[in-house]
Image (cartoon, coloured by chain):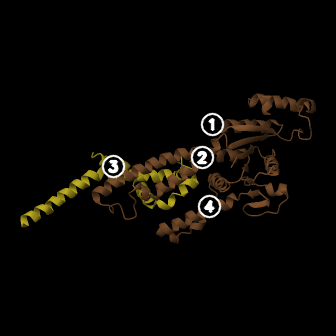
Amino acid sequence: MKLWKTFKKKWSYFADGFKDKSIEKILQELEEMENGFALLICGSLIGLPAPPSLLTLRLLPYLEREIKIMLSKSIYLDDKLAMWAEMIEL
Amino acid sequence: MKRIYFFLGKGGVGKSTLSISLAHYLWKKGEKVYLASIDPAHNLYDILNLPPFKGEKEVKPYFWIEEVDIDAYLKRILFEIEEKMRHLYAYLQIINLEKIFDLIKDTPGMEETATLFALKDIIKKHQEKDYIIIDTPPTGLMLKIFSLPFISKLWLEKLSKWRERILERRKIIAHVKGKDFLGKETTILPEEDKVLYELNFQKKMISFLIQLLTDKEKSYFILVINPDELSLKEGKRIINTLNRFNIFVNLVILNKAGLTEKKEINFFKNLPKKEVSFLKNLKDILNLTWDDI
């Protein structure tokens, strides 16, 4: 019984590891997409082509997560190459 | 609603006066008429010698007039957004949001979009009237307002698709790691996502306006010009720009040409030579027949 419990515990570590690995790329992709979405919405602030301001302004109350991601990504922008290299496991 | 008339043209050509004349004519025929000006520099009340008032007013039975206060409209929209942001972004409590929104109010493009929102609202509100007559701002602003739904549509479609893809990925992650993995406030399902809801809401509004503006039965565009080269050239620009969006001018009115006082419609006999040559020019430039003028 004890052996079975230990096996289950160990297996759950493996399973979690597999789960993490399986969504790793999707998570990175999601962050990039959320960053891009926020960049589009706030694009006029940095000179990107942007949708009409009032339309995007109406979306702003619901974009806290995306804006946080965008800001954190912009902080590490100078290390973008390293981030992409990490993504494709160079 | 039987029809909606839009008066277009360069500033000072007589759009407001002619829109009032048409409104009065239709009202005299026993129709329910709503006349609105969406020009930020209104002069409907001045022409009619009415004291200024807010909102619409039934000046005669079944004759409503309104100078739409775009500035107040924009302030109201921004206030609603500001309140939502204050409520949802906890850390914004310490920032003076009102001052930021005061600045945003004057950002380029705001006025046009607010006018568009206002236009949608007044048209929806006055659907039961027989005729809606809209006196538009001069060319520059008017073209921006009318091209906005078409540009916005493209943006909204792209943004919606992008958002749907984000939600798809969130769903996969939530399925594997649990629904709170991305944070309790992060929405996963499209039907719960307020961003997608807002995008769809705006798409509906834009589609309504595009449908209305391109509906040849319901919408009637009247271009007002004066017998001078500038207003003619601007008129041509209006026609060409609107054609790109499938909006077609139905009627060109040559105002201030000294024709209104003549009872017989014999153009050439009564017109000075300069005006006859102008009319010929107008006919050629706008690709019209003599019957159109």
The residue at which mark 1 appears reads as B244
Mark found first going from the N terminus, 4 or 2: 4
The residue at which mark 3 appears reads as A82
x and y percent of residue B164 in the render? 42, 50
Amino acid at dot 2: Pro
Mark 1 falls within which chain?
B
The residue at which mark 2 appears reads as B149
Q: CA distance from mark 3 to mark 2?
A: 41 Å
Q: CA distance from mark 2 to mark 1?
A: 13 Å
x and y percent of residue B230 in the render? 79, 38
The residue at which mark 4 appears reads as B103
Figure chain in brown:
B
Mark 4 falls within which chain?
B
On screen, residue B161 versus residue B126, left or right, reads: left
Image quarter of the C terminus of chain B: top right
Q: Nearer the viewer, residue B99 or B5?
A: B5
Which residue in the rendered view is the most extreme toward the bottom?
B94
Chain A, chosen colour in render: yellow
On screen, residue A41 versus residue B288, left or right, reads: left
Question: In what element is the residue under mark 2?
Answer: helix
Mark 3 falls within which chain?
A
Crowdedness of circle 4 by 10 Å Cα count: few (<14), some, many (20+)? Answer: few
Q: Residue at x 71, y 57 (%)?
A: B68
Q: Is residue A44 something one can see in this rendering? A: no
Crowdedness of circle 2 by 10 Å Cα count: few (<14), some, many (20+)? Answer: many
Could you tell me if the residues under marks 4 and 2 are in contact, i.e. CB atoms within 8 Å? no
* Foreground label between 1 and 4: 1
Q: Is residue B195 something one can see in this rendering? A: yes
Q: Nearer the viewer, residue B174 or B207?
A: B207
